[in-house]
Amino acid sequence: MLTDIDPRNLIGRKAFDRHGTKIGTIDEIYLDDATGVPEWAAIRTGLFSRDAFVPLEPSELLKDGTLHVPFDRALIKDAPDFGVGRHLSPEQEVQLYHHYGLDVAPPPSVPDHDFGKLAGSEEA
């Protein structure tokens, strides 16, 4: 979704929930370790509040520069709090995906290959 946007340009933009209610301001953007694609936004939810992580994939950046997140404000504010400024571990990401009811893709399976014959076996 946001692959063509410089993540630094998202910082400071306003974020809104599915009903158009303001959530807060984007504080940080977290990139996927493998692809470098923006994956999570940390949104400052108030003056004395914490940052809440929201997934960028189902979210939409509008032409006016605001981010619209397809979840209710209450769900966003109840997201697991991992603090900002640190790397999100794979386990933390899974917790966030589950919190938002999003599917987590299983790791790719190793294909089953026939690498040859067992030593000492003979073909019939």
Image (spheres, rainbow, N blue to C red):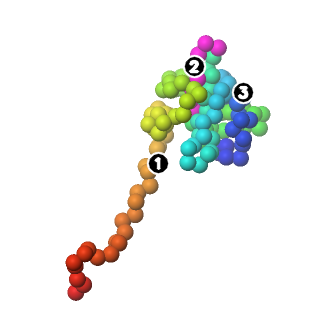
Asked whether residue 52 is drawn in magenta, I would say yes
Label located before the other in sequence (2 or 1): 2
Q: Nearer the viewer, residue 50 or 113?
A: 113
Residue type at the position of mark 3: Gly
Quickly name the residue at label 2: 50
CA–CA distance between discs 2 and 1? Answer: 28 Å
Secondary structure category for the residue under label 2: loop
Residue furthest out toward the front: 119
Quadrant position of the C terminus in the picture: bottom left
Residue type at the position of mark 1: Ala
Q: Which residues are magenta?
A: 47-54
Secondary structure category for the residue under label 1: loop
CA–CA distance between discs 2 and 3? Answer: 15 Å
Mark 1 is surrounded, within 10 Å at the Cα level, by few (under 14), some (14 to 19) or many (20 or more) other residues, namely few
Label located before the other in sequence (1 or 3): 3
x and y, in percent, of residue 10 in the image: 71, 34
The quadrant holding residue 110 is bottom left
x and y, in percent, of residue 64 in the image: 77, 34
Secondary structure category for the residue under label 3: loop
Residue type at the position of mark 2: Arg
Report how many numbered discs are placed on residues in the image: 3
Quickly name the residue at label 3: 12
The quadrant holding residue 68 is top right
Give the residue at x 70% y 30%. Answer: 11
Give the residue at x 35% y 72%. Answer: 115
